[in-house]
Amino acid sequence: MMTMEEALRQVPCRFAAGDIVSGTILEVRPKEVLVDIGYKSEGVVSLSEFVDASNVKIGDKIDVLIEKLEDKEGNVILSHEKAEFKKNWDRIQAICAEGGRVSGKVKAVVKGGLVVNIGVEAFLPASQIDIIPPKNLQAFMGNVYEFKVVKINQDRQNVVLSRRELIEQERNDRREKLLNEMVPGDIRKGVVKNITDFGAFIDLNGLDGLLHITDMSWGRIGHPSEILKVGQELDVVVLDINKEKGRVSLGLKQKLANPWENIETKFTVGQKVKGRVVNLVPYGAFVELEPGVEGLVHVTELSWTKRIAKPADVLKQDQEVEAVVLGINKEEQKISLGIRQLEANPWDAAELKYLKGARVKGKIRNLTSYGAFVELEEGIDGMIHVSDFSWTRKINHPSEVVKKGEEVEAVVLEVDKPNQRIALGIRQLSEDPWENIDRYYRVGDLVTGKVTKLASFGAFIGLQHDIDGLVHISQVSEDRVDKIKNVLKAGQDVTARVIKIDRGERRIGLSIKAANYSDEQLKEEQKLLDALKPGEDLVALQHAFDAAEEAAKPTDEKVE
């Protein structure tokens, strides 16, 4: 009788490490599967090697690769995964060469991407998972997807996959189809993909279209986020298609009727309307009369009388206001509004209320270099020009005569209704002394007065009737005077002789040294003053008086 050892020696050896053999599942354990391959002992396959462990059943036939015929415990070590890999390798290479697709299940998350079982283990980089690389890779675990084999490393037997390329290809196919199918006027469903300051990009199932902010609503929108949210589904109107550039313009407001179509039937010039302030700008306020229809109240139409620098000084955002329609331009979609027209224009009655020549009273509201503004009533000012303060004195600035807040009396000189101006004068309250100057002063008269102002060329003397006379430095003393301040002081009383009266130029020339002249001496002095240039201002007479002084010197001095 033969022993077992002898019997085994007579059986030819059919098993070797690296062989792929068929086996039958005998037992499914928590972590491994027991497989009968017809060898003297059963083999073990790790349960993790199966794509779906729940489908592994006793009696199933599977292919396995023999890794070891016996380990330390005498078990045969098998690999179902490696058997599948070896069988599938040629198939994967063919798919890669053709740029084909494979189906696979995400097996694990590793650094930089995912491990996918496509019959062999393959690597899916994170950048190739989707069009936008996902942040949570764990969300893909256990899912089955279609992939494109993009690279195979023969030596390392590595396979690189891409899911993104398939998604992009599908989107491009859908995009081309949509571009060929769509026509302006179509209404399409879309999803808000991205929001910017100027609009929103809408995903039309593979084709992105731009919904510009101006096409979102007939009304005013500050930012697209006021009416749209990312991920929001909506129906949009196709406005324009550029197939060459692959661009589509979309509209949302076009689904509704244009509120400007019958604007003339809704609003008429002179009509009182109500609305809400939706925008304040330096030049005016925009008022929403109804959704999609706004009117502009220009800053000049806010008040008849108040000087409003900017609308924000009197109006607030979202404030409800009343206004009057001033004009309608349907083509440009503009409506002009006015708020001041709700009240009577006080300037309509100004011509009757403030007659030329009438005396009025008011408070000085403001001072400028050219005049003073007098508040006659709320919102109506009159202006006193610097030249209308005095008949005789030269006023350089109104502050020399009046102060802010001071009440003054004046005479109405002119009412300019179109420009809303009233000219006033203070000097017109009294008679112009120069009209009757001969009644007050004649050449040769001896007068007294006080020194009001000193200048390098002479001194001004305040006379009666609010008239100033000028004493040139050459007319102060018979002796030569180098500096006027050495002989005269402001406020000093002096006696002088009138030696020149120029009615046209409203000037009086005085001489202190001639106070004791005889008639003959006065005539000589008069001749010198007659040589002065007509029209020359008294404050600029220095050179003229110097010339007169030179002419009065003895002949021998001039020769020298």
Image (cartoon, grey):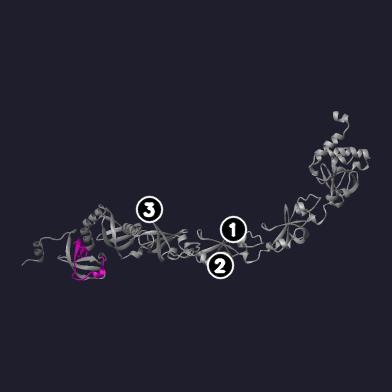
Circle 3: residue type: Lys
Any mark on residue 491, and which? none
Query: Sequence-wise, which precedes: disc 1 or disc 3?
Result: 3
Query: Sequence-wise, which precedes: disc 1 or disc 2?
Result: 2
Circle 1: residue type: Tyr
Q: Which residue lies most toward the left here?
A: 1
Q: Position of residue 311 (x, y in %)?
A: 60, 61
- Secondary structure under tag 2 reads strand
Q: CA distance from mark 2 to mark 3?
A: 43 Å
Mark 2 neighbour density, 10 Å: few (under 14) some (14–19) many (20 or more) = some
- Secondary structure under tag 1 reads loop
Stretch of the chain drawn in magenta: 51-78
- Secondary structure under tag 3 reads loop
Q: Are marks 2 and 3 in contact (CB under 8 Å)?
A: no
State the quadrant of the N terminus: bottom left
* Residue at point 46%, 65% (across, down): 227
Can residue 492 be spotted in the picture? no
State the quadrant of the C terminus: top right
Q: Position of residue 418 (x, y in %)?
A: 66, 57
Circle 2: residue type: Gly
Per the image, is 28 magenta? no
Q: CA distance from mark 1 to mark 3?
A: 40 Å
Q: Position of residue 450 (x, y in %)?
A: 87, 49
Q: From the image, tell me which residue sits under label 3.
A: 245
Per the image, is 72 magenta? yes
Q: CA distance from mark 1 to mark 2?
A: 18 Å
Can residue 453 be spotted in the picture? yes
Any mark on residue 283, and which? 1
- When the figure is inspected, residue 33 is found, relative to residue 431, above or below; the finding is below
